[in-house]
Image (cartoon, rainbow, N blue to C red):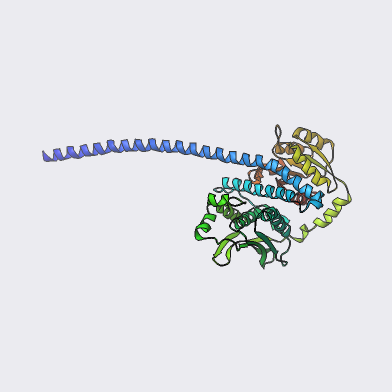
C-alpha cells in the first residue's frame, strides 16, 4: 500500500514538473518571438538611421563642393588675393566643414567594414601644406602660432589616401589648437624608414600651451568632450577618438599621445605609404601632351554650380567642355560626338550616372568615364564596375585630384 502511495506522489510530482516545464517553454518561446520582433524592429530603425545619415551627408557634400571649388578657383585666378583674410576664412570654413561631414559619415559606419582607403598617387608636401594653410585663418584670429616642418628626405610623390590622411591630421591639429592658448602648435612630417617599395612616415603635432591633464586626455578620447570648455574655443569640440582610430586602422596606421607636464602634449600618427612605380611617373609628359592639343570633355551633372566648377577646372587645362544636366541628353551627346573623357555624376534624377553609363557602353566601350559621387564610394564599387565606369572621384575634390584622374585615364583607360 505504501508503495502505491509513493508511486502516486512521484507520478504527481512528475506530472506537475511536466506541466510546469511546458508553461516555462511556452513563455520562453513567446519571449523569444517578442525579442526577435524587437530585434528586427531595432535593426530596421538602425538601417533607416544609417541611410538617413548617408543621404544627409551626401546632400551636404554637394553644395559644399561648389563652395570649395569656387573658392579654389578664385584663389587660383586671382593670386593677389592669396593673403586676403575673407578668402582664407572661406577656405578654412569649407575645409573644416568637410571634415565635420566626413566625421559624421564615419560615425555612421564605425561598426561596419565600409571604410576602404583609396590608393592613389598624391604629393604629400602639397597635402600637408594645404592643411596648414587651411588653419591660417583660425590661428590669425587667436593668440596661437601653427608651425610647420617637412622632412626634405621624404619622397614627395607617394601612393595612399590623401583624403583620409587629411581628415586624421585635421582632427589632431584642431585638437592641439583647442587645448592651446598663447602658445605654439608644431606640425612636423618626418621620415622614419624606407624599404624597397614603402616608407614609414610620422606626423607629429605637439603644443606648449595649456597642459593636458589626465582628465582632459581621457576626454580627447570620448565622442564628445567637455562642452563648456569647447564653448570658449574658436575651434569648438575636439577630436572624436573613435573616428580617428577607425580611420587610422583603415590605413594600417597608429595614433599615439604623449603628455608631459613641462612641454605640453604630443600627438603622433605613424603610417606606411607606397612608392609609385616608374611606369606611373608619366604625369609631366602627359601634362605636356594635354597642353599641346585641345581635348574634348563631356561633363554630366544635375547641379549647375558643380558643372561650372568642373568646366572651369578643365577649361584652364586646355579642354573644350560640353556640359549637360541629365543622363538622357548625355547619351545622345555621347552617341553623336567624340569625347576624350566623360565626367559622370552618379546621383541624378530620372536616370542616374550608373544607368547613363550602361547605355553609353552599349555603343561606346572606349571613352573613359569617370564617376563623380558625393556618396562613400565603397557603397557603389560593384555597381561602378558593372556599369563600365573606369574610375571615380569623391566630391568635393580639388583641381589636382581631378587632373590626376583625368590624365591617368586618358593615358591608359583600360588598365585602371
Location of residue 204 in the rendering, given as x and y in whole percent from the top left corner: 63, 62
Q: Can you say which quadrant of the picture contains the N terminus?
A: top left
> Which quadrant would residue 309 be assigned to in this image?
top right
Residue at x-position 72% and y-position 43%: 67
Question: Please, which residue is most extreme toward the right here?
Answer: 292
> Which quadrant would residue 285 be assigned to in this image?
bottom right
Location of residue 206 in the rendering, given as x and y in whole percent from the top left corner: 61, 63
Location of residue 229 in the rendering, given as x and y in whole percent from the top left corner: 55, 52
> Which quadrant would residue 276 be assigned to in this image?
bottom right
Q: Nearer the viewer, residue 14 or 369?
A: 369
Residue at x-position 75% and y-position 47%: 71
Q: How many marks?
A: 0
Residue 342 seen by the camera: no
Question: Please, which residue is most extreme toward the left here?
Answer: 1
Residue at x-position 76% and y-position 32%: 328
Q: Nearer the viewer, residue 9 or 27?
A: 27
Q: Is residue 49 above or below residue 257?
A: above
Location of residue 339 in the rendering, given as x and y in whole percent from the top left corner: 83, 42
Residue 283 seen by the camera: yes
Amino acid at each position: 500500500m505504501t508503495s502505491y502511495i509513493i508511486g502516486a506522489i512521484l507520478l504527481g510530482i512528475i506530472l506537475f514538473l511536466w506541466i510546469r516545464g511546458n508553461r516555462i517553454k511556452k513563455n520562453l518561446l513567446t519571449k523569444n518571438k517578442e525579442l526577435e520582433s524587437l530585434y528586427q524592429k531595432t535593426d530596421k530603425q538602425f538601417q533607416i538611421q544609417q541611410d538617413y545619415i548617408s543621404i544627409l551627408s551626401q546632400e551636404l557634400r554637394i553644395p559644399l563642393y561648389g563652395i570649395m571649388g569656387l573658392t579654389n578657383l578664385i584663389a587660383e585666378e586671382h593670386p593677389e588675393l592669396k593673403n586676403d583674410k575673407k578668402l582664407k576664412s572661406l577656405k578654412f570654413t569649407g575645409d573644416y566643414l568637410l571634415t565635420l561631414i566626413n566625421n559624421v559619415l564615419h560615425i555612421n559606419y564605425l561598426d561596419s567594414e565600409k571604410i576602404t582607403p583609396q590608393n592613389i598617387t598624391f604629393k604629400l608636401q602639397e597635402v600637408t601644406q594645404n592643411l596648414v594653410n587651411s588653419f591660417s585663418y583660425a590661428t590669425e584670429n587667436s593668440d596661437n602660432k601653427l608651425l610647420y616642418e617637412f622632412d626634405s628626405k621624404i619622397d614627395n610623390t607617394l601612393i595612399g589616401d590623401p583624403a583620409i590622411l587629411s581628415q586624421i591630421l585635421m582632427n589632431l591639429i584642431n585638437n592641439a589648437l583647442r587645448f592651446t592658448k598663447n602658445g605654439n602648435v608644431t606640425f612636423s612630417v618626418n621620415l622614419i624608414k624606407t624599404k624597397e617599395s614603402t616608407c614609414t612616415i610620422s606626423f607629429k603635432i605637439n603644443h606648449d600651451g595649456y597642459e593636458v591633464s589626465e582628465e582632459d586626455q581621457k576626454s580627447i578620447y570620448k565622442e564628445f568632450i567637455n562642452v563648456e570648455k569647447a564653448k570658449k574655443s574658436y575651434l569648438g569640440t575636439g577630436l572624436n577618438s573613435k573616428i580617428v582610430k577607425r580611420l587610422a586602422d583603415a590605413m594600417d596606421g597608429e595614433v599615439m599621445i604623449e603628455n608631459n607636464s613641462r612641454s605640453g602634449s604630443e600627438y603622433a600618427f605613424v603610417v606606411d605609404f607606397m612608392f609609385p612605380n616608374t611606369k606611373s611617373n608619366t604625369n609631366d609628359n602627359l601634362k605636356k601632351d594635354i597642353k599641346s592639343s585641345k581635348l574634348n570633355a563631356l561633363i554630366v551633372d544635375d547641379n549647375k554650380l558643380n558643372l561650372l566648377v568642373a568646366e572651369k577646372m578643365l577649361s584652364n587645362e586646355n579642354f573644350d567642355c560640353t556640359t549637360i544636366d541629365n543622363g538622357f541628353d548625355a547619351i545622345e551627346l555621347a552617341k553623336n560626338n567624340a569625347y576624350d573623357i566623360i565626367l559622370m555624376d552618379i546621383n541624378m534624377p530620372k536616370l542616374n550616372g550608373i544607368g547613363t553609363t550602361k547605355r553609353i557602353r552599349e555603343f561606346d566601350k572606349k571613352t573613359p568615364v569617370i564617376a563623380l559621387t558625393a556618396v562613400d564610394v565603397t557603397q557603389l564599387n560593384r555597381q561602378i564596375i558593372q556599369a563600365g565606369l573606369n574610375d571615380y572621384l569623391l566630391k568635393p575634390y580639388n583641381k589636382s585630384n581631378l587632373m590626376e584622374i583625368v590624365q591617368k585615364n586618358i593615358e591608359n583607360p583600360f588598365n585602371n
